[in-house]
Amino acid sequence: MHAIERYVRPGSLEEAAEILRAGNVTVLAGGTDLMPQTHAGRVKFQSVLMNVRRVPELRGIEEHGGVVRIGALVTITELRESALVRERLNVLWQACDHFASDQIRNAATLGGNVCNASPAGDTLVPLLALEARTVLASKPNGSLETRRIPLDKFFSGPGRTLKKPSELLAAIEVPLPPQGFVGEFYKHGTRPGLDISAISIAVGAQLKGKVLNEVRIAFGAVAPTPIRAPRAEAVLEGREADAATLEAAAQAALGEIHPISDVRASDWYRRELVRNMLKRVISHVGQL
Ligand SMILES: Cc1cc2nc3c(=O)[nH]c(=O)nc-3n(C[C@H](O)[C@H](O)[C@H](O)COP(=O)(O)OP(=O)(O)OC[C@H]3O[C@@H](n4cnc5c(N)ncnc54)[C@H](O)[C@@H]3O)c2cc1C
């Protein structure tokens, strides 16, 4: 473990971005990933440890002009208690409801889940299905700048993202889904809540009668990053979720995933879960 030479607690986004610009900074939010990772020796602290919990611009859940902005510091508990999230981004709400324990949910932030970039991160899968984007803040030329990256382009491998070390994740923006959009999140672990997902699935669609439109399917823990499944989506688009369509969608999805075998599940078992559970989740969505 590297020695921490300085511990800082900026009080504004400007100040946090200025500290990041100087380099050699580890960002600390809830610490629920960072602390176990540093204790296990998998991650080394930089010389400056920056606790961002006093940065007010990283807080809050607000809707403006059809976009929900969720501050990076918003905790899983806050998401779970938000009426806006429950009513309009319900598939994300479901993932928060299946996330760890009360103690972890109270500390764990959405920004930490996104920046940790685990292929099994539970909020990433519904956020992909909701076509969310990241808002990154930095001070490259002395003044505060932001850039946005769609979440489906943000992850570059397990634990890796396109965020530069000089950038702070300020927020996640989620365009409000169309009226009538319904969704379901499914997570498979050995225990229902406290476990890291062996696989996870988020399905969203706009229902016209029983016909599925705007179909969005995302998976966790079946590839080096969380992924969308565009070929399975295309199979379902404009169709009813009958048995033949469900089987065709599941077969398409199997061609889009690249699961590994690890302590949580074998490659074979993950494929079986995807094939069976995707059909179940889609048929639930088709009846919502
Ligand atoms: C017992 C236990 C159970 C868990 N269960 C689940 C679960 O069910 N589902 C799940 O998905 N995860 C789970 N986790 C993992 C963890 O709780 C989440 O990933 C959590 O959201 C991380 O958020 P945090 O605020 O604690 O991040 P931190 O640990 O503070 O940070 C995580 C990483 O993100 C970086 N970072 C954080 N915020 C920012 C920012 N704003 N800008 C730039 N970089 C940033 C940090 O530098 C670090 O690299 C569990 C962890 C534990 C210990």
Image (cartoon, grey):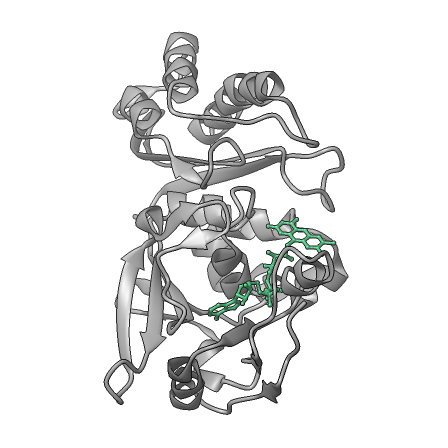
Q: Nearer the viewer, residue 48 or 269?
A: 48
Identify the image quadrant of the N terminus.
Answer: bottom right
Residue sitting at 63 percent across and 22 percent down? 266
* Quarter location, residue 193: top right
Task: Give x and y (percent) for residue 177.
Answer: 33, 50
- Residue for point 31% across, 63% down: 67
Compared with 54, 92 (above or below) is above
**Is 114 placed left or right of 175 in the picture?**
right
Q: Position of residue 256 (x, y in %)?
A: 38, 24
The front one of 168 and 192 is 168
Q: Which residue is outermost to the front?
A: 2
Q: Please name the residue shown 63% across and 70% down the image.
A: 30
Q: Residue visible at 49% across and 20% down? A: 279
Q: Position of residue 81 (x, y in %)?
A: 60, 64
Is 32 or 250 nearer to us in this picture?
32
Residue 128 lies, in percent from the top left, at 39, 46
Give the image quarter of residue 273.
top right
Front-lying residue, 237 or 252: 252
